[in-house]
Image (cartoon, rainbow, N blue to C red):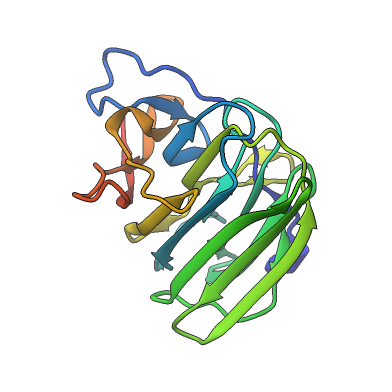
Amino acid sequence: MTDRIRKRRQPCKPKQPQKSILLQPGWISSNWSGYAKIGLPRSYKRISAEWIVPYVLPSRMNAYSSAWIGIDGYNNTDLIQTGTSHDWVNGKPVYYAWWEILPAAETMISSPVSPGDKMQATITKITRKTWCITLKNVSKGWTFRTVQRYSGPQSSAEWIVEAPTVAGSTAALSSFTPIQFRHCRLNGRSPQLRSNLKGIMTQGKRVLAVPGPANRCKDGFVVRRVSCS
């Protein structure tokens, strides 16, 4: 079972894309794909979004993916986040919800998650070092909420699909149906997503995950799993 697998999400170490990359992202990463907004310290106090849990497709090996929202983690080692996992483990798909504050590993949420479920997530600063993490499964009718201490710089905010770290290494990214982030908000407003804020996931010479352009309201996008050289 997944609860025996110690998984951890890692900060992004973005690289500037090479001119030969035709997808023209703002940044590339070996473990993140999505949109990230960068600001001054203490810029971001609230982030939210909704997404539909994807279907995981069969793989020849164990493979993992997570969709999440978070504050910090882009060019720093702090991160507060919550999301869903969509893994292929021992020949079966595995879905669950979680929250995490680095450097600790994820804490699983015991309430059920299935592909096609509509998720709503919010992370809100309450006091100087106290934050509320809320994750709601609209389809199944449950809401999880926890209040935790966090003292990161609050200098970046993200809507991400990630290949998590398993057993100390970045895991193989599972194959999943497109993940659509909608109604993204930052400090209660549309984040005004732009092309220079998006990042693609590459490992070696392979492109693994690509975010599409922001929607007309600049508050949503789709991440697609790809595999090309």
| Residue lying at 52% horizontally and 87% vertically, measured from the top left | 141
**Where is the C terminus found, in terms of image quarters?**
top left
User: Is there any visible trace of residue 58 in the rendered image?
Assistant: no
Left or right of residue 222: residue 34 = right
Q: Determine the residue located farthest toward the top in the rendered image.
A: 19
Residue at horizontal 70%, vertical 31%? Answer: 77
| Residue 171 to residue 78: above or below | below
Furthest-front residue in this view:
127
Please state the horizontal and vertical placement of residue 160, each as a whole percent of the image.
47, 47
Left or right: 96 in relation to 197: right
Q: Position of residue 168 (x, y in %)?
A: 73, 40
Residue at position x 55%, y 70% in the image: 95
Q: Provide residue 115's location: percent of width, then percent of height.
A: 43, 74
In the image as oriented, which residue stretches furthest toward the bottom?
Answer: 141
> Is residue 199 depicted above or below 111 in this figure?
above
Q: How many marks?
A: 0
Residue beneath the point at 71% across and 36% down: 78
Front residue of 51 and 226: 51
Q: Nearer the viewer, residue 141 or 216?
A: 216
Which corner quadrant of the image does residue 202 belong to?
A: top left
The one nearer the camera, 177 or 82, is: 82
Q: Quadrant of the N terminus?
A: bottom right
Q: Is residue 146 above or below residue 222?
A: below
Between 33 and 60, the residue placed more toward the observer is: 33
Q: Is residue 158 visible?
A: yes
